[in-house]
């Protein structure tokens, strides 16, 4: 594997899509595109769709929203690396409480779960709980 180029984008889908399209048009031999946050994942997926490259370019993205999940299902994105926001928040607050309570810390790192989601496992019950989160009582 060889990294041929990178694109830094502002936090919006339009810039991410334009940057990904420019990259794919400049380097016709790219066969993997990675988005390291929600915006760049969306941009990569939209660019692959608009340039009709889903059978040529393998797309990996981080984070998820309904558009990312739709692109995973239809093949514009091949893999999503999905975090567990509840776990991130709960464990961070718990660690902060320990620190403020004076509990000696051997490690300040808080590790949380991540999940590798693809079309084969996206509808399994455990993955559905991560992808399709909702709040009790929300409208």
Image: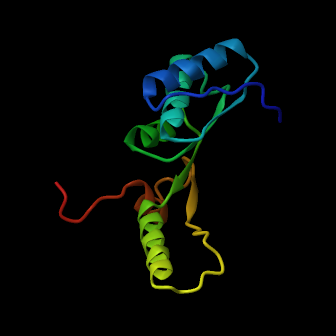
| Left or right: 67 in relation to 8 | left
Residue 18: image location, x then y, percent: 52, 18
Report whether residue 113 is seen: yes
Residue located farthest toward the top when viewing the structure as drawn: 26
Q: Quadrant of the N terminus?
A: top right
Name the residue rendered at 68%, 27% in the picture: 6
Position above or below: 57 against 122: above
Counting the numbered discs, the total is: 0
Work out whether residue 75 can be spotted: no
Quarter location, residue 121: bottom right
Q: Where is residue 112 shown, x and y percent of the image?
A: 55, 66
Q: Nearer the viewer, residue 25 or 6?
A: 6
Query: Toward which corner of the image does residue 94 lie, by quadrant?
Result: bottom left
Question: Residue at position x 55%, y 36% from top?
Answer: 77
Q: Residue at x 48, y 35 (%)?
A: 39
- Residue found 56% across the figure and 65% down from its top: 113
Quarter holding the C terminus? bottom left
Q: State the image coordinates of residue 119 (x, y, percent, origin top left).
A: 54, 47
Name the side, left or right, on which 69 lies relative to 80.
Answer: left
């Amino acid at each position: 594997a060889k990294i041929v180029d990178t694109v830094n984008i502002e936090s919006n889908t339009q810039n991410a899509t334009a940057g990904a399209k420019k990259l794919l048009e400049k380097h016709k031999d790219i066969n993997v595109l990675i988005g390291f946050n929600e915006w760049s994942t969306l941009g990569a997926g939209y660019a692959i769709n608009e340039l009709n490259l889903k059978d040529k370019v393998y797309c990996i993205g981080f984070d998820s929203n309904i558009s990312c999940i739709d692109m995973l299902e239809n093949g514009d994105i091949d893999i999503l690396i999905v975090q567990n926001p509840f776990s991130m928040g709960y464990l961070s607050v718990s660690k902060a409480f320990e620190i403020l309570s004076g509990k000696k810390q051997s490690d300040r790192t808080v590790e949380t779960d991540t999940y590798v989601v693809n079309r084969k496992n996206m509808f399994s019950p455990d993955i559905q709980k991560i992808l399709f989160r909702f709040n009790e009582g929300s409208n």
